Image: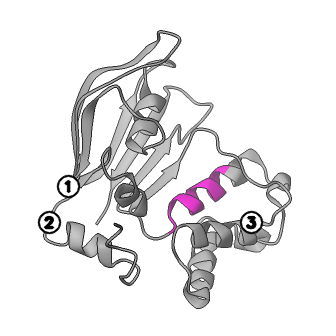
Amino acid sequence: MDVCSSKPRGSCRDTTLSSLNRMELTIKNLSKTYLNGVKALDNVSLTIPQGMFGLLGPNGAGKSSLMRTIATLQAPDSGSIHLDAIDALEDKMALRRVLGYLPQEFGVYPRVSAEDLLDHMAVVKGIVNRGERRDTVQALLEQTNLYDVRKRSISTFSGGMKQRFGIAQALIGQPLLIIVDEPTAGSTPASATVSTTC
């Protein structure tokens, strides 16, 4: 049973994490081997404190595999992931409620305007109040310098504008955990960033 379904938006975050002063992402003995035999993750253990954390490594080092696993988009073969009291592998929805994720490549509806698509994503993220959603979308568009082009379809955006839109959607709902895979795509060295916020 989802104990959050009958509570006001945001209350589940409070009951899960309110007693903790400092957030911590703990990864223990995480392993993942794909069907083609490639071992992407080999007994990875990390403790990431509140703040920003970057992973540096060449292509194929397993950075994206780790990001996707933390974001609950794929299951590991073994190991555990905890964001404080949240068991990310056992309670994926609890993690997703407090997660903002920008993958290396993300698909969008090309003919939909930036404003409408961000509004739709806010609904999916649980912001059902129209006024709150409007304020959230406007603030994110302004923060990412996309407000003046909010009525344009995503297909007309440059690569940099699409990346900024991706950042805006990752920030919907003031997430406690933000994962940005290849935030500077096309530059070297390759990187991935995890940020835990309060």
Quadrant hosting residue 56: top left
Counting every numbered tag in the picture gives 3
| Circle 1 crowding by C-alpha within 10 Å: few under 14, some 14–19, many from 20 | some
Please indicate whether residue 73 sits to the left or right of residue 133 in the image: left
Please indicate whether residue 33 sits to the left or right of residue 161 in the image: left
Mark sitting earlier along the chain (3/2): 2
Q: Secondary structure at mark 3?
A: helix
Q: CA distance from mark 1 to mark 3?
A: 34 Å
Mark sitting earlier along the chain (1/3): 1
Q: Secondary structure at mark 2?
A: loop
The numbered dot on residue 75 is none
The numbered dot on residue 20 is 2
The magenta-colored residue range is 163-172
Quadrant hosting residue 33: top left
Q: Are marks 3 and 2 in contact (CB under 8 Å)?
A: no
Q: How is the image coloured?
A: one colour
The numbered dot on residue 114 is 3
- Foreground disc of the pair 3, 2: 2
Q: CA distance from mark 1 to mark 2?
A: 8 Å
Q: Is residue 8 above or below residue 56?
A: below
Kind of residue indicated by mark 2? Leu
In reply to whether residue 65 is colored magenta, the answer given is no
Q: Is residue 9 above or below residue 13?
A: below
Q: Secondary structure at mark 1?
A: loop
The residue sitting at 63% across, 31% down in the picture is 186
The numbered dot on residue 84 is 1
User: Residue 57: x, y in percent?
Assistant: 42, 22
User: Residue 89: x, y in percent?
Assistant: 32, 44
The residue sitting at 34% across, 66% down in the picture is 1
The residue sitting at 56% across, 39% down in the picture is 184
Which residue is outermost to the top? 37
